[in-house]
Image (spheres, helix red, strand yellow):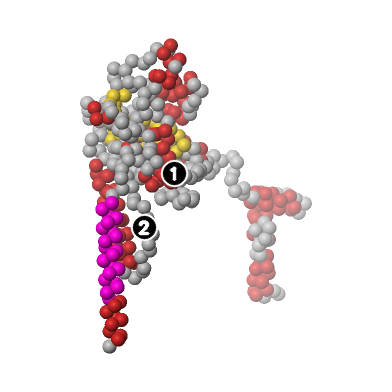
Amino acid sequence: MASETMIQNAKAFLQQESPDSKLNLYDHMCSVMHKILENRTPNSVDLLESLSQEVKTNKFAPPCDPSSDVRPASLEVELANVQNKLFEKPSEDAEPEPEDEVEMPLPDLMDTAHYFEQAGLGLGREETFRIFLALKNLVDTHTLQSVRFWGKIQGTEKNYIVAEVEYREGGEEEQEGEEEEGEESREEETDEAKEGDEDNLPTPDYKPPPVIPKEETGTGCNKKTYFVCNEPGTEWTKLPPVTPAQIVCARQIKKFFSGNLEAAVISYPPFPGTEINYLRAQIARISAGTHISPVDYYKFEEDDEDDSDGEGRDSFVENVEFEPPRVQELIDFSQQLGPPLQHVLPQGRCVWVNPPLRQKLRTSKTKRRRKKEKSRTSLSQNTDLLY
């Protein structure tokens, strides 16, 4: 008689899995015997091979059942789920919005797109309507005075939908204060680090050019505020103010947008910032270089009437009493164009500014004092050695 160890060894041998099918003979024979005993199949000996094949086919499980509806969601399905929120109606339990005397800043984007279609331009009615709903969400979440669909910029991975807005009075003061505090703290840290390094390292003779200050919010290149998103329905991201150094460098390089605001801009000369700053700089250049308006379409303040410096005009509003010219007058369209509002100067600003000279004098004086102190200490050490 076979001992118990022999039985265990035989069972272990039958339970070895096949590297191809990942099955073992012991479980397969148990399944075949269970099927025969359950169905009481007559002439089981003659049908043993077919029964074994049937058991094997029943155990086959494809990675994705074609008959089932459970499939991994594609990018189109995920985007549709995100944009589905744009078409949802507000719930009845939601509090009604207070009625203000301020006009609705949201423009009639579909009417504007209709006129673009007459010229063979546009993004299509479906996408335009989705962008209109996305702008509506932007108006609901921010205190804005005016909103305009600036355009769409295509990228290698994702695209950018750009909205140009203006805040109401006092709507952006808190955010500006936070940004200024962050910049001041960074400047203080860099100054402290430089002072610590100057005590140990020799100071180079090279003096970098003075930093041109950026224009304040609401003036020049930062007159408007811009929000971007990759697709209608996704979260809007506010672009930071642009600096003259970024505009000057953006003129010297050519880079494709990737669609990722945090992507690094690898170029020569090196760009001071990431893609979010590069996008803001190109928007400022395009906005200043592509503006066109007929004569008397805008009203200017008395201070801006005389544009003798060639710096453009900063404060202007639409003229309500404007009457469009006749069709015959548009034959010579050059005479119907108004003067440019503002253009970006080679300095990277709309208004020229002379760099401050006081900071140069202060830094040079402090450096001279430190050099004199170092020379004195070195002389005292040398005289001590003589004694």
Instruction: Tell whether 130 sits left or right of 50.
Output: left
Question: Which residue does the numbered mark 2 point to in the structure image?
Answer: 207
Name the residue rendered at 31%, 18% in the picture: 322
Q: CA distance from mark 2 to mark 1?
A: 23 Å
Name the residue rendered at 38%, 39% in the picture: 345
Query: Per the image, is 285 magenta?
Result: no
Amino acid on which disc 1 is placed: Ala
Tell me the SS state at disc 1: helix
Q: Does residue 233 appear in this view?
A: no
Residue 317 rendering spot, x and y as whole percentages: 29, 26
Mark 2–mark 1 contact, CB under 8 Å?
no
Question: Which residue does the numbered mark 1 point to in the structure image?
Answer: 250
Q: Earlier in the sequence, mark 2 or mark 1?
A: 2
User: Which residues fall within the magenta stretch?
Assistant: 357-377
Labels in figure, total? 2
Instruction: Tell whether 189 sits left or right of 72.
Output: left
Give the label on residue 335, or none. none
Residue 234 rendering spot, x and y as whole percentages: 41, 39
